[in-house]
Image (tube, rainbow, N blue to C red):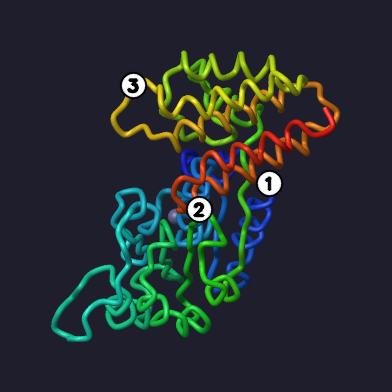
């Protein structure tokens, strides 16, 4: 087995691993559509890649020697179709002579109904399932429900509720969690000082370390004192008008995101008896932050701080 592509390297995602181990043991149990959902940077992609590698392997164990394993490692496996990252998925042209690669019509007419070239299955990985256009999605629905036996789909998404109910109801949804601090330490051994603020995700916050440390010191002082909490809230809201130009693409939303990640960390490290309640509220705020409603940041912060001030 290629040790780099073993699922045993996935840390801190027990629930997804339980599912995946079962499917690897008996590939006939793999459902037509798997939906991996959860925050970015916690292992959805890594687990999907390792899972595909093992399932496609001629020996079924990711032996690293068979033709399937070799082609997979070279990124040339003919039965693994990975859609491009960050690109809208279109329905594509209905003109048979045009190819429109990585469109739904291309997939249906040129790929999935043919038997796999090499392995027992053909696996289609969609890195962000929110990128289907409505048209493309409708065109794929029937196939998702009853794909040919040799075809399996894996959809990844950060937010399950951004997918249509019609998709969710056809898939087996597998939840990925924010990583615990101890899991992050196991995965990331670089000793980088800002790891602790990543909020259970390995995707770093873009704010400079000084800003994160300043947010942390204010949060530590505030979490058990309502007056200070109010001052902290006002400082956050005032930051919009006075924030320094540390990076061109760093917006107020990113700043609020950084504040929330640091708050998560501070509450996790605290001794507060009901810290899990507060952490849940912070995660809720984080979800709202990216709901594509503009200028919602101050509302989110006001509501969150009201919840944090409760019952101190
Ligand atoms: Zn193999």
Q: How busy is the neighbourhood of tag 3: few (under 14 within 10 Å), some, or many (20 plus)?
A: few
Q: Position of residue 134 (x, y in %)?
A: 39, 75
**C-alpha span from label 3 to label 1:** 38 Å
Ligand 1, by image quadrant, is: bottom left
Marks 3 and 2, the one that precedes in the sequence? 3
Q: Residue at x 35, y 64 (%)?
A: 81
Quarter of the figure with the C terminus? top right
Q: Position of residue 179 (x, y in %)?
A: 62, 37
Q: Name the image quarter holding residue 21.
A: bottom right
Which residue matches tag 1?
Answer: 14
Secondary structure of the residue carrying numbered label 2: loop
- Residue 306 badge: none
Q: Which of 55/238 is in front? A: 238
Comparing marks 3 and 1, which lies closer to the viewer?
3
Marks 1 and 2, the one that precedes in the sequence? 1
Q: Residue at x 41, y 28 (%)?
A: 206
Which residue matches tag 2?
Answer: 291
Q: Residue at x 51, y 30 (%)?
A: 258
Q: Which of 176/266 is in front? A: 266
Q: Is mark 1 within 8 Å of ligand 1?
A: no
From this view, report whether residue 100 is shown above or below residue 4. below
Q: Which of 128/210 is in front? A: 210
**C-alpha span from label 3 to label 2:** 25 Å
Tags 3 and 1 in contact by the CB under 8 Å rule?
Answer: no
Q: Position of residue 59 (x, y in %)?
A: 50, 59
Q: How busy is the neighbourhood of tag 2: few (under 14 within 10 Å), some, or many (20 plus)?
A: few
Which residue matches tag 3?
Answer: 246
């Amino acid at each position: 087995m290629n040790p780099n592509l073993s699922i045993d390297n996935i840390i801190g995602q027990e629930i997804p691993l339980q599912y995946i181990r079962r499917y690897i043991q008996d590939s006939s149990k793999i459902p037509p559509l798997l939906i991996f959902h959860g925050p970015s940077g916690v292992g959805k992609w890594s687990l999907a890649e390792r899972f595909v590698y093992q399932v496609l392997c001629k020996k079924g164990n990711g032996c690293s020697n068979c033709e399937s394993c070799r082609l997979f490692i070279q990124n040339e496996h003919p039965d693994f179709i990975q859609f491009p990252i960050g690109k809208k998925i279109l329905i594509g042209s209905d003109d048979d002579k045009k190819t429109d690669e990585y469109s739904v019509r291309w997939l249906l007419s040129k790929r999935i109904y043919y038997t796999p070239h090499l392995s027992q299955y053909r696996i289609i990985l969609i890195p962000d399932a929110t990128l289907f256009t409505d048209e493309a999605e409708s065109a794929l629905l029937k196939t998702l429900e009853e794909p040919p036996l040799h075809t399996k789909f894996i959809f990844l998404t950060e937010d399950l509720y951004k997918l249509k109910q019609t998709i969710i109801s056809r898939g087996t949804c597998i939840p990925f969690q924010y990583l615990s601090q101890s899991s992050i330490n196991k995965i990331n051994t670089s000793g980088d000082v800002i790891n602790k603020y990543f909020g259970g995700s390995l995707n770093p916050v873009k704010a400079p370390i000084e800003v994160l440390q300043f947010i942390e010191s204010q949060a530590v002082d505030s979490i058990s004192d309502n007056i200070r909490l109010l001052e902290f809230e006002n400082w956050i809201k005032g930051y919009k008008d006075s924030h320094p130009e540390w990076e061109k693409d760093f917006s107020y939303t990113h700043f609020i995101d950084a504040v929330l990640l640091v708050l998560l960390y501070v509450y996790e490290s605290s001794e507060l008896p009901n810290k899990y309640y507060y952490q849940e509220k912070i995660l809720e705020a984080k979800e709202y932050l990216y709901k594509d409603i503009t200028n919602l940041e101050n509302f989110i912060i006001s509501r969150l701080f009201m919840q944090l001030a409760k019952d101190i």
